[in-house]
């Protein structure tokens, strides 16, 4: 997995130290003090209003393609077809910006909703609902044995980044003297995130006036993680209610969670508790929640016909 960070050396000193023109992913994070660091994707699409962020996306794409051994500068390079996952309710302009970023890098592209890609990879194509909870968005898709319509899908901002912001706010309110960064917050969340009754106290270390100190963030972490539950459960129940009545029970018993935030401990239990209000149901997490969407994208690419692909203008 490649973290969506891109950084360029800030000045002559940074260039001399790094001896590189661009840093990608974890390497960019590790060297961020000397970089113009960008996280160009926000809520699953390119941030608006910054040419630098668009440039960062293109650097990310070039890096990903290089990882599979394709060299962009070769005239005889392999033709590239790219399946790109987008939020279920991504705006038309956001999709167009993604197409623009791909132009000249890939020869043709297919934009698909992220939860649909998960469903396709799992072959969960009938009487199921996928909830893909990533960093920027939580995306929902009800599968009815055909390509989902707009009415079958939802997108919420209640996801990993929202948890990070809430956790930082709560820690700052309770421990104003503690020094931390959003990267520390994200690391704590990824290691210890949970909802419901805690199995153990969550202890972390952070500096207070320059001195490393132990900090109990159990209550703050629980509150931050549980802040995404009401909108997610409400949206799930609303989608199920719009399924044909004779199929609602089947859909309630096939709720599938994917995305990095699906790994929050206790999340499936919390969703099943919400489903009790409408007759009960079952929620499961896919075997590999982080890569389920990309696995689905690969399955879509293999099955797609030539007419399914959108040829980009700069394609050779």
Image (cartoon, rainbow, N blue to C red):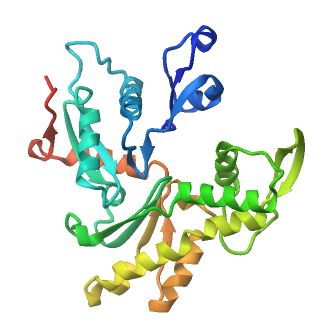
Residue 181 position within the rendered picture, expressed as x and y whole percent measured from the top left: 69, 43
- Viewer-nearest residue: 45 or 270: 45
Is residue 261 positioned above or below 301 on the image?
below
Q: Quadrant of the C terminus?
A: top left
Q: Quadrant of residue 109?
A: top left
Residue 262 drawn at (x, y percent): 53, 61
Between residues 300 and 212, which one lies in front from this camera angle? Answer: 212
User: In the picture provided, is 66 more to the left or to the right than 12?
Assistant: left
Q: For the view shown, which residue lies furthest in the left direction?
A: 307
Residue depicted at 68% across the width and 69% down the height = 223
Along the line of sight, which residue is nearer the eye, 86 or 116? 86
Q: Residue at x 8, y 45 (%)?
A: 307
The residue positioned 13% from the left and 47% from the top of the image is 308
**Lateral position of residue 174 relative to residue 27, left or right:** right
- Residue 120 vs 266, above or below: the answer is above
Rendered position, 108 above or below 297: above
Q: In the visual, does 39 lie left or right of 164?
A: left
Could you say which quadrant of the image residue 161 lies in? bottom right
- Residue 220 x, y percent position in the rendering: 73, 64
Location of residue 251 in the rendering, given as x and y in whole percent from the top left corner = 36, 79
Q: Is residue 234 left or right of residue 48?
A: right
Whether residue 129 is visible, yes or no, is yes
In the image, what residue occupies the spot 36% across and 59% down? 115
């Amino acid at each position: 997995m490649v973290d969506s960070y891109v950084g360029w050396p800030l000045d002559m000193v940074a260039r001399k130290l790094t001896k590189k023109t661009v840093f990608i992913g974890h390497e960019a994070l590790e060297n961020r003090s000397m970089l113009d660091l960008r996280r160009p994707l926000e809520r699953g699409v390119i941030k608006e209003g910054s040419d630098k962020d668009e440039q960062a996306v293109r650097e990310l794409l070039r890096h990903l393609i290089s990882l599979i051994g394709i060299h962009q500068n070769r005239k005889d390079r392999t033709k590239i077809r790219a399946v790109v996952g987008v939020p279920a309710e991504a705006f038309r302009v956001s999709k167009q910006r993604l197409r623009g970023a791909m132009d000249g890098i890939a020869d043709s592209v297919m934009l698909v909703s992220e939860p649909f890609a998960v469903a396709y990879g799992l072959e969960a194509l009938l009487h199921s609902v996928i909830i893909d909870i990533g960093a920027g968005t939580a995306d929902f898709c009800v599968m009815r044995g055909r390509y989902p319509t707009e009415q079958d899908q939802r997108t919420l901002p209640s996801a990993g980044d929202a948890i990070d912001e809430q956790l930082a706010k709560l820690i700052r309110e309770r421990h104003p003297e503690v020094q931390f960064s959003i990267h520390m917050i994200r690391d704590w969340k990824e290691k210890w995130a949970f909802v419901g009754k805690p199995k153990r106290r969550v202890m972390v270390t952070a500096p207070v006036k320059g001195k490393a100190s132990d900090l109990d963030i159990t209550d703050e972490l629980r509150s931050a993680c549980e802040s995404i539950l009401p909108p997610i459960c409400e949206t799930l129940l609303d989608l199920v209610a719009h399924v044909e009545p004779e199929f609602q029970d089947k859909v309630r018993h096939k709720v599938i969670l994917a995305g990095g935030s699906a790994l929050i401990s206790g999340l499936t239990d919390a969703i099943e508790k919400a489903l009790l209000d409408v007759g009960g149901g079952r929620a499961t997490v896919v075997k590999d929640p982080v890569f389920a969407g990309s696995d689905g994208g690969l399955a879509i690419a293999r099955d797609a016909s030539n007419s399914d692909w959108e040829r980009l203008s700069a394609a050779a």
